[in-house]
DNA sequence: CCGGATCCGTTTCGATACTG
DNA sequence: CAGTATCGAAACGGATCCGG
C-alpha cells in the first residue's frame, strides 16, 4: 500500500488539496479517463496508454475517494466489479482539463494528453465540448442508476 | 541533482509534457509564484509558504527552462543574481491556473492555493483577473527590459 | 551574501508477482 | 478481475559546502 495516512497529513498543511490531486501525474490521468474517455471500471482505467500500474491505480482511486471527488458503486452485472463515477466536484474539474487541453493543443502539439480528434474539438469550442462531455457522462449515470 | 536526463526520456513517451509540468506539485507552485505572485528571483521562490528546498527548486527551474516555459536573464542590479520570467507559453498557463483557482475556491474553500483576496478576485472575474495579472507581468518585464 | 551543487538519510513511487 | 505485498529505484528534504 502506498502510505494511507499521508493524505491526512497533507490536508492540514496550507498546500491545497487541489495540488495533491492536480499536481499529480496519475490522478490527473485517472480523472481524464473518467471524465473524457468514458471509462468507469478498474480494468478500463488500467488499460490506458500511459500504463498505470495496479497498485498506483488503486492508491489514486482511494485518494480521489478520500477527497470526495469519486464515488464508487457496485457494478450491476457483478458483485465483484465496481463502477467509478466522479462526484459533482470531480466533474467540475472539466474546466481545468479543458484549459489544460487547450494549452497543450496550442503549445505542445507534439504531446498527447487526449486523442487527436478530441483535442481538435476541445480547442475549437471548449465550452460546447465540455457540455457535451458532461451530457455523455449523465447518460452513463442514468444507465447505471447512479 | 535530481535526475537530469529524465526529462528527455519522458518527452519521448506519449505522456504529454503538459503532465510533466502540471502534474507536478512543485512546478505548479513555481509557476503560480512567477505568474500570480510577482516573484522573479530564486530567493523569493525559495521563500514561498510551502517551503520548497533549494535543490528541488533549482531542479524545477531547470526543467521549466528545458521545456521552454521559462526564461532566465541576468539581474540588472547584480551579476550574481538572476531573474526568472515565464515565456509566452508559460504565461499562457494563466488559463489553467485560473480554472484551478476557481475550482478550488468553489470546492476546496479550506485549502489555500492562492491568497484569500486573490482567490476572491479570481472567482468573481477570472478573465479580468487574468488580464490584470498579465498586465502586471508586462510592466515588470518592461521595467527590467526583458 | 546569492545562486546553486552535493551528499545523505528517509519517504514515496512503481513494476512485477501474487492472492482471494 | 480487483486489488495487495514486495522490494528496488527514484524523489524528497535538510544540511552543508562552494564559487563569484
Image (cartoon, coloured by chain):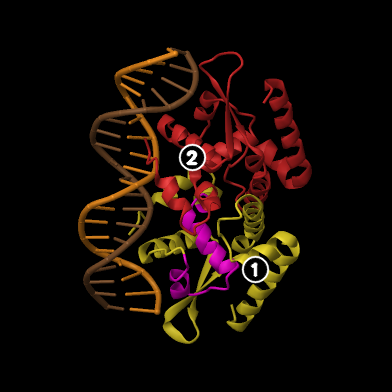
Chain colours: A yellow, B red, C brown, D orange
Residue B101 versus residue A78 in the image, above or below = above
Residue D7 point in image, percent of width and height: 20, 56
Q: In the image, residue B4 lies at what x, y percent? A: 39, 40
Q: Of helix, strand and loop, which one carries label 2?
A: helix
Q: Is the residue marked by circle 1 packed among few (<14), some (14-19), or many (20+) residues within 10 Å?
A: few
CA gap between label 1 and label 2 equals: 29 Å
Q: Are marks 1 and 2 on the same chain?
A: no
Could you tell me residue B21's position as x and y percent? 53, 46
- Using the rendered image of the protein, determine whether residue A86 is visible from the camera's viewpoint: no
The secondary structure type at the circle numbered 1 is: helix
Q: Main secondary structure of the magenta part?
A: helix
Range covered by the magenta-colored residues: A21-49
Task: Please state the chain letter of the residue tagged with numbered disc 1 in the rendered image.
Answer: A
- Tell me what residue is drawn at x 61 percent, y 60 percent: A89
Q: Nearer the viewer, residue B52 or B118?
A: B52
The residue at which mark 1 appears reads as A117
Residue sitting at 63 percent across and 73 percent down?
A: A137
Crowd rating for badge 2 (residues with CA inside 10 Å; few <14, some 14–19, many 20+): some
Horizontal side of B95 relative to B51 (left or right) equals: right
D8 horizontally vs A143: left or right: left
Q: Which residue is mark 2?
A: B63
Amino acid at each position: 500500500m502506498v502510505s494511507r495516512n499521508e493524505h491526512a497529513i497533507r490536508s492540514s498543511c496550507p498546500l491545497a488539496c487541489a495540488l495533491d490531486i492536480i499536481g499529480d501525474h496519475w490522478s490527473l490521468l485517472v480523472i481524464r479517463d473518467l471524465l473524457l474517455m468514458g471509462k468507469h471500471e478498474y480494468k478500463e482505467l488500467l488499460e490506458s496508454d500511459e500504463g498505470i500500474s495496479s497498485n498506483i491505480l488503486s492508491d489514486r482511486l482511494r485518494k480521489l475517494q478520500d477527497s470526495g471527488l469519486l464515488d464508487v458503486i457496485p457494478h450491476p452485472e457483478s458483485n465483484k466489479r465496481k463502477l467509478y463515477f466522479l462526484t459533482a466536484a470531480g466533474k467540475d474539474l472539466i474546466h481545468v482539463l479543458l484549459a489544460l487541453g487547450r494549452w497543450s493543443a496550442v503549445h505542445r502539439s507534439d504531446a498527447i494528453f487526449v486523442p487527436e480528434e478530441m483535442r481538435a474539438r476541445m480547442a475549437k469550442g471548449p465550452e460546447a465540448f465540455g457540455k457535451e462531455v458532461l451530457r455523455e457522462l449523465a447518460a452513463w449515470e442514468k444507465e447505471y442508476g447512479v
